[in-house]
Image (spheres, helix red, strand yellow):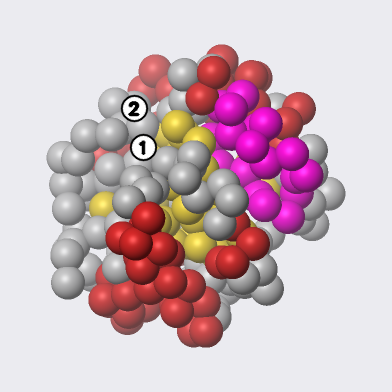
Amino acid sequence: MKNPLLAPSLLAADFYRLDDALAFIEQKGGALVHIDVMDGVFVSQISYGQPVVRKLKPHSSIPFDVHLMVAHPENHIDSFAEAGADYITFHWEAAVHHHRIIECIHRAGKKAGIAFVPSTPVSVLKEVLPFVDIVLVMTVDPGFGGQHFISQCADKIAELVSLRAVHGWNYLISVDGGINTETAVLVSHKGADIIVSGSSFFNGLLEFPVSEGASF
């Protein structure tokens, strides 16, 4: 089992002290800053948007992975790219023209990610897997933090590992939702490259070795 990269989710941070949260992420060896953008349409909650990303970007040396949990993600690619996103991850379920969105992200000079909810099988993603840089496996239903890990989703990680090996694809496999010390071990055994942790990370409850100093 390899040590995965750590991508702490700002959604679980103290919004009054986001600058301190960024410093804490760097101190604890975070390789990515995971930024959950929620619009109240694709998911029920509303979080933050481009102005927050723009303000935070100069205060971090770690790449930003902006996770768009929004309807019509194609309308927001350029603005988040301009605001400072390094990776832009959108949901399979929120879009129709997936290739076009991936191309738009790459034209903006950013890395492209595809996310999918627990009820979506890996098989529907196969046509876009050759073109993405990150595949984000949701192990909870997206919309708010602190949920319990859906164990059946772990097998999707192994399936993505197998597809990548067979076809020679180059995406990283990220896992988001209910990640604590126990589930971090599970998803790492399955082959996850990146673990996203919010509540457990910021509450000091994630005790798991991660790789540090990775370059993207």
Main SS category, magenta section: helix
- Characterize the local packing of mark 2: few (<14), some (14-19) or many (20 or more) Cα atoms within 10 angstroms: some
Residue 14, horizontal then vertical, whole percent: 49, 47
Residue at 59 percent of width and 57 percent of height: 125
- Alpha carbon distance from label 1 to label 2: 6 Å
The image quadrant of residue 68 is top right
Q: Which quarter shows the N terminus?
A: bottom left
Q: Is residue 101 magenta?
A: yes
The image quadrant of residue 98 is top right
Instruction: Determine whether, in the image, residue 27 is placed left or right of residue 64.
Output: left
Q: Amino acid at mark 2?
A: Ser
Mark 1 in CB contact with mark 2 (< 8 angstroms): yes
Against 71, residue 57 (above or below) is above
Against 48, residue 42 (above or below) is below
Residue at 42 percent of width and 41 percent of height: 133
Against 17, residue 42 (above or below) is below
Residue 45, horizontal then vertical, whole percent: 75, 53
